[in-house]
Image: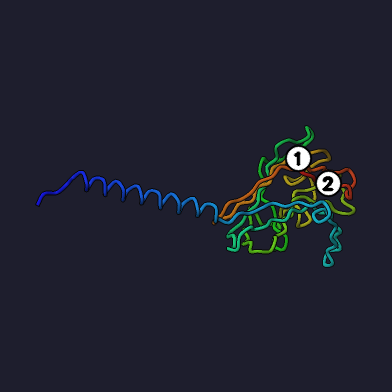
């Protein structure tokens, strides 16, 4: 029996090409089905004043809402703030900060990010805040050391001025998002403001 090697090579090449196309199609489809996080910002919804009954604090927060655009739950989501541009009078600032998810418990000793899972409902992210009666002009990055009441000139303090920042959200099992914003750290606490960077 004579083996036709040319025919065997053609069959093998066709099988290899078919396998390659199948794997490529599967990877492309998986990429487009992958869950994605989306940063949303609305001045009406995300610039708000809250009263804390247990401490009597009245604080104005700048928040973002993070949405998961797919049905599968986004696991271990974290958010960071990178300072892109700052006023010259800013001292003690680090280039990157982990942000606080609203509703997650914290203490003065909490350091780093506290990951959360995000399902189909949007999740609120605290960015910066001011407090009625604060002794310093400016605002604070929403991180546990400041949220716990340590509102002094620490690493979370932003003296009055304009700050350009990039906020990134990431998760373990999907694609994150990032957006640039301009934060206006005020001289009067109620004037705290943020908008999308131009």
Bin the neighbour count of mark 2 within 10 Å (Cα to Cα): few under 14, some 14-19, many 20 and up: many
2 or 157: nearer the viewer? 2
Q: Secondary structure at mark 1?
A: loop
- Where is residue 53, by image quadrant? bottom right
Measure how far apart labels 1 and 2 are at the Cα level. 12 Å
Image point (81%, 56%), residue name: 45
Q: Provide the residue designation for mark 1.
A: 197
Disc marking residue 75: none
Query: Residue 72 location, x and y as percent?
Result: 58, 63
Determine the residue positioned at 74% across, 51% down.
Answer: 127
Query: Dot 1: few (<14), some (14–19), or many (≥20) neighbours within 10 Å?
Result: few
Q: Residue at x 87, y 51 (%)?
A: 134
> Residue at horizontal 89%, vertical 50%?
190
Report x, y in % for residue 160: 84, 40
The circle drawn on residue 193 is 2
Left or right placement of residue 94 versus residue 131 in this view: left
């Amino acid at each position: 029996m004579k083996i036709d090697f040319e025919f065997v090579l053609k069959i093998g090449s066709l099988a290899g090409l078919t396998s390659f196309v199948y794997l490529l199609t599967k990877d492309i489809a998986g990429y487009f089905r992958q869950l994605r996080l989306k940063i949303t910002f609305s001045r009406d919804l995300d610039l708000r004043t809250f009263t804390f009954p247990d401490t009597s604090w009245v604080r104005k927060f700048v928040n973002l809402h993070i949405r998961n655009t797919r049905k599968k739950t986004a696991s271990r989501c974290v958010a960071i703030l990178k300072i892109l541009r700052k006023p010259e009078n800013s001292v003690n600032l680090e280039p990157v900060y982990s942000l606080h998810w609203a509703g997650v418990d914290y203490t003065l000793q909490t350091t780093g990010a506290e990951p959360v899972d995000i399902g189909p409902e949007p999740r609120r992210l605290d960015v910066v805040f001011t407090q009625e009666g604060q002794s310093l002009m400016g605002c604070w990055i929403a991180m546990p050391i400041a949220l716990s009441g340590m509102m002094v000139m620490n690493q979370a303090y932003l003296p009055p001025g304009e700050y350009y920042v990039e906020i990134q959200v990431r998760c373990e099992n999907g694609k994150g998002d990032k957006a640039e914003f301009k934060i206006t750290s005020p001289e009067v606490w109620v004037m705290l403001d943020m908008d999308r960077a131009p």
